[in-house]
Amino acid sequence: MAITLGANQYGKAEVRLVTVRREGPVHHLKDLTVSTSLRGRLTATHLTGDNADVVATDTQKNTVYAFAKEHPVGEIEDFALRLGRHFVDGFDAITGARVLVDEHAWDRIAVDGAPHEHSFSRAGDERRTTAVTVYGDRAWVVSGLTGLTVLKSTGSEFHGFPRDRYTTLAETTDRILATAVTARWRYVSGRHDWHKCFTEVRRVLLETFATKHSLSLQQTLYAMGEAVLRAREEIAEIRLSLPNKHHFLVDLSPFGLTNDNEVFYAADRPYGLIEGTVLRDDAEDAGQAWHTLPAF
Ligand SMILES: O=c1[nH]c(=O)c2[nH]c(=O)[nH]c2[nH]1
C-alpha cells in the first residue's frame, strides 16, 4: 500500500487589522479580518520537516500589517490581490495564494446631527467579503457580503407543496419572509470598480427582495441573482445562501383571542436553508475561483 500527501495549504487565519487614515482632523477607519493560505512545493515539510520552502505563517501575518502601512489599503479586492501576488511572485516554491478579506463596517457617531470626526459605532453584523485566488499569472476575484438581514411583512406566499402523512405546515398566501443574505459573486477576469459594483449589487439584492412578490424563497433567490447579473456585466456568476428565518403565527385561541397575522414567534432553529447559483450561460471558466470556498 502506497501512502501519499494529498492537497494541502497553510496560512494565517483571521488576522485582525484596523487602520486609521487621517485627513486633518477627520479620521477614516478600516476594520478587516484577513486570512492567507499558500500552496506549492510543500511536500518536504510534511514528509521530512525540511522547512526551506515554508513561508512562516507568522511572516504572512506580518506581511499583512506591513502592506497596510506601505500602501493605503483601499478596496479589499485590491489589498487581497497585492498580498496574493506578493507571495506567489516572491517565493519560488509558492505557486498559489488564497487571500480572504472580510470588512466590518463602522458608522460615524452623530453628535447634534453631524457625523463625528473620529468616533464610530459598529454598523452591525453585516460584512463585505472577498476571496482572491492568485495562481501563476492569473487571478480570480469572488466578492460578496454576509449577514445582511432582511424581512418583509407581506408579499410572500408558500403553498402548493406536496402533502403526505408527515406534513403539518399550513398553506399560506400571506406570511413574513425573513433571511440573512450571504452572497458571493465571481467577477470576470480583469480589474473592476470594486466599490461601485459592491454598492450596486447590495442595492439590487435589497430592492429585489423588497419588490419581488414571493411564492417561495427559492423563487426570490433566483430573482435576486438574475437581477444582479442583469445589472452588472462584470459579474459572471452569483451564489446565494438564504436561511429561512421562520416567523410562526402564535396560536392565541387558548386565550380566546384571534391572530390576524399580527403576533409571531421568531424561531431561530431549525431553519430552512435555501442555496443556489445563478450564472450566465456564456460565462468564462471559473478556474480556481471557488476552490476551497464554501459551495455557496
Ligand atoms: O419558501 C419556502 N421554501 C421552502 O422550501 C419551504 N419549506 C417550508 O417548510 N417552508 C418553506 N418556504
Image (cartoon, grey):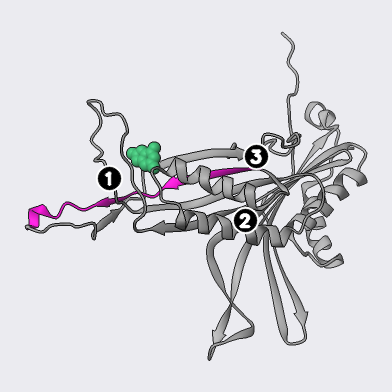
The residue indicated by pointer 3 is 293
Disc 3 or 1, which lies upstream in sequence? Answer: 1
Q: Is residue 238 magenta?
A: yes
Crowd tier of the residue under label 2, counting other residues whose Cα lies within 10 Å: few below 14, some 14–19, many 20 or above: many
Q: Which segment is the magenta one?
A: 237-255
Disc 2 or 1, which lies upstream in sequence? Answer: 1
Q: Residue 243 placed where, x, y %?
A: 45, 46
Q: Nearer the viewer, residue 191 or 225?
A: 225
Ligand 1 quadrant in view: top left
Residue at the spot 51% in from the left edge and 54% down from the top edge: 208
Q: Which mark is residue 172?
A: 1
- Separation (CA) of disc 2 from disc 1: 30 Å
Asked whether, in this view, residue 159 is left or right of residue 282, the answer is left
Asked whether, in this view, residue 233 is left or right of residue 158, the answer is right
Q: Quadrant of the C terminus?
A: top right
Residue at the spot 68% in from the left edge and 38% down from the top edge: 290
Crowd tier of the residue under label 3, counting other residues whose Cα lies within 10 Å: few below 14, some 14–19, many 20 or above: few
| Tag in front: 2 or 3 | 2
The residue indicated by pointer 2 is 201
Residue at the spot 31% in from the left edge and 39% down from the top edge: 159
Does the rendering let one see residue 16?
Answer: no
Q: Identify the residue at the far bottom of this view.
A: 112
Q: Quadrant of residue 280?
A: top right
Amino acid type shown at disc 2? Val
Amino acid type shown at disc 1? Thr
